[in-house]
Amino acid sequence: MSVVKCPDCENLFAELDRYIDSVKDNTGVLINVLHKAQEIFGYLSEEVQQHVSEKLNVPLSQVYGVVTFYNFFTMKPKGKHQIRVCLGTACYVKGADKIMERLQDELGVPMNQPTADGKFSIHAVRCLGACSMAPVVLIGEDDYYGRVTPDEVSKILDKYRRAE
Ligand code: FES
């Protein structure tokens, strides 16, 4: 399934830019901006790091250096199966927060932390471009689950728990 851009996801970089514009004249702002970027995107991809570098006029090598120095920054969603729970507006009003809670209970980990066996990690995203199927969960790159209810979470996870 292809991801169709919707206003929520198109606005993510704009949201980051607004934050950068509000703080960029302060000293030592890079770490704060990277925190905000990770909060918005879930992790700091090369594309996001490049964007921050350009917006702050800081060498990419410096951005990369900070990202790799602090272990609270991550450049990749972690866990063999990355579970992305959409907390965008359309999904949130359809109960995405309950899906997030159930996933964390089932797997026993908070967001952005892999399970002990490394099989799963849970990440919040702001739109998966499938708002008509809200609430939406994406596992890996292609497995979209729409209109998910909390009671379906365990069954969905079982499919991946069984697979090696
Ligand atoms: S808000 Fe668009 S897929 Fe959730």
Image: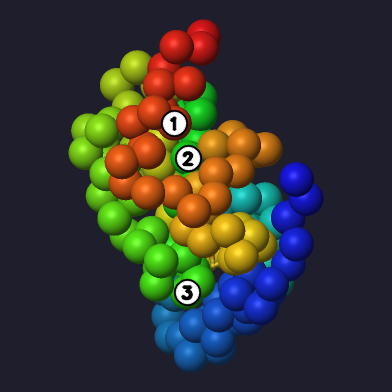
Q: Which residue, given by chain and number where applicable, does mark 2 sit on?
A: 83
- Of labels 3 and 2, the one closer to you: 3
Q: Earlier in the sequence, mark 3 or mark 2?
A: 2
Q: Disc 1 marks which amino acid?
A: Ile
Residue 118: name its quadrant: top left
What amino acid does circle 2 point to?
A: Ile
Q: For mark 3, give the secondary structure.
A: helix
Front residue of 88 and 42:
88
Q: Which residue is mark 3?
A: 89
Q: Label 2 neighbourhood size at 10 Å, few (<14), some (14-19), many (20+)?
A: many
Would you identify the image quadrant in which residue 142 lies? top right
Q: Which residue is mark 1?
A: 156
Viewer-nearest of labels 1 and 2?
Answer: 1
Residue 94 position in % (x across, y down): 41, 66
Instruction: Give the class, few, some or many, for how many residues have Cα within 10 Å of label 3's Cα (few <14, many ≥20).
Output: some
Residue drawn at x 62%, y 37% as measured from the top left: 143
The answer to whether residue 43 of the structure is visible from this angle is: no
Q: Are marks 3 and 1 in contact (CB under 8 Å)?
A: no
**Does residue 92 appear anywhere in the picture?**
yes
The residue depicted at 47 percent of the width and 40 percent of the height is: 83
- Residue drawn at x 48%, y 90% is 22
Ligand 1's quadrant is bottom right
Q: Secondary structure at mark 2?
A: strand
Q: Is mark 3 within 8 Å of ligand 1?
A: yes
Residue 164 in picture, x, y percent from top left:
51, 9
Which of 123/96 is in front? 96
Q: Please rate how many residues cluster around mark 1, counting C-alpha atoms within 10 Å: few if below 14, some from 14 to 19, many from 20.
A: few
Residue 85, placed above or below residue 95: above
Q: Residue at x 47, y 58 (%)?
A: 135
Question: Which comes before the other along the chain, label 1 or label 2?
Answer: 2
Distance of mark 3 from mark 2, alpha carbons?
18 Å
